[in-house]
Amino acid sequence: MLQFLLVSRKTIFTGLTAIVCVFGSPSCHALCPDLRDYYSILERDPVLLDSQLSNFLEDCYENSEYFSLLGSAQIQMGDLLRALENLERSLLLDPQNGSAAVDYAEVLFRQGQVISALEINNQLSERDDLPEGMSELIAERSRLWRPFTVQYVGGLGLSFGHDNNLNSAPIGERLTLTLSGKPISLEVSPEYRANAGSYTGLSAGVTRVQETLGLTSRVSGSLRGRFGDISDYEMVQGSFLVGLSDSAEDSRWSTALGVDHLNFGKNAIFSSSALRASYRLGRYKQCGFYPTIAAQYQHFHKQESLSGVEGSLGTEMDCQLSQSDIVQRVGVAISALENRATRSERLGADRSGWRFNFALQKQIGAGQLLAQYVHTNLDDESGYSPIFSDGAKRHESLNSFFLRYVLPASFLGKSAQFSASVYHNEQRSTIALFRTRGTSAEIGINWGI
């Protein structure tokens, strides 16, 4: 296919440059030599042509045809960066220069900017001054380029880890209940205490990305499992996401619809569906600021009374610091939360609170360090239950910290990456039953497809 594209480009270029002075190059400088004798060198020796044309730069500085021919030679040489610069100069001098537009579209295509290349190609096909047969060649090039607007990216992962609280059990071994107005202490059964153990993790996912004029769509699915010696603590989680955003390199807006499902101990535990949207309100230096809004339906299969709808409204800051020696990317988000019960019998009724999220990315050696901290506060609308703290309202705060280091592992495959991660979470609550703490450590290998 690439060979065909190269042949098509040469054919298009030959036809267009043959009439370049008529087709669109009125800006010829008086001191610039006649360039017609140089076209024959283009296919035979582009390096020689590049060298010879460089001698005329000062005389041809305002000549669109000169920069178009120079850019074409550099394409033949494979020097796409210089070709892009010279072709842009040619089109600035004369936006109607057809030969420059043809080559400019090809450079964009080779650099992966398929949508921009197709847009220029479409503009060329609409012109009424094309040489005979050129419309068909341009249309064929568009047909060959369109499949490149769709990309598939997949991944597989294998990991081994240890968790000191596989079952997310309460911290304490005794619980205090309020019965008939009197506190009574009960011992927690061993099966409901924190259990530590090792596990094997498996993951797989695939993402489909399609670009159209002005829009980028993403559809992804993933499956992750945690398996160990105790089947009651095995976990399988599936996710599906559909996203839409503008197709700019730095997207201004994005929306996403996601569905998640969690099985724990071979039982369906939790499912959710969420809708999220963000818009870049402004940018200051290397940081963008994004108001966000989201809504999520949460369904608990075993305890349906816990189900609810959670909405959030907040703002995010995302800073790309590629030139910094300290960190390369920093993200901060804060949002207000409101969780409405879908059943009147839910203990504590509605809940409200806020969430803070901080993440950073840093280059260390040949690898990347990723760190994230999340803090969430939630308060119940009414007393949780008379048997806990005389029916007091429940207040909870959840802190979690995630640290991961990713390093290329080319000896296991071109796309292989080694990863090591640590995750810690702690939930504090005015009710002892909901106080939990857990830490896990994991190492693994991931492969891209």
Image (spheres, helix red, strand yellow):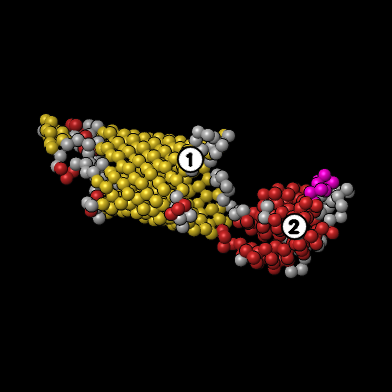
Quadrant in the picture for residue 322? top right
Q: Residue at x 63, y 56 (%)?
A: 109
Decide which of 249, 39 is in the foreground and name it: 39
Q: Is residue 378 visible?
A: no
Tell me: residue 138, above or below residue 391: below
Tell me: residue 405, above or below residue 21: above
Tell me: residue 395, above or below residue 242: above
- Spot occupied by residue 202 in the image (x, y as percentages of width and height): 34, 54
> Which mark, residue 46?
2
Decide which of 35, 12 is in the foreground and name it: 35
- Spot occupied by residue 254 in the image (x, y as percentages of width and height): 50, 47
Dot placed on the residue nearer the N-terminal end, 2 or 1: 2
- Residue 61 lies in the magenta stretch: yes
Going by the image, does 303 lie left or right of 64?
Answer: left
Which residues, given as a range, are shown in magenta? 53-62
Going by the image, does 201 lie left or right of 185?
Answer: right
- Residue 352 lies in the magenta stretch: no
For badge 2, the amino acid type reads Pro
Q: Residue at x 23, y 52 (%)?
A: 229
Q: Is residue 249 visible?
A: yes
The residue that label 1 is drawn on is 365
| SS type, badge 1 | loop
> Which mark, residue 152?
none
For badge 1, the amino acid type reads Gly
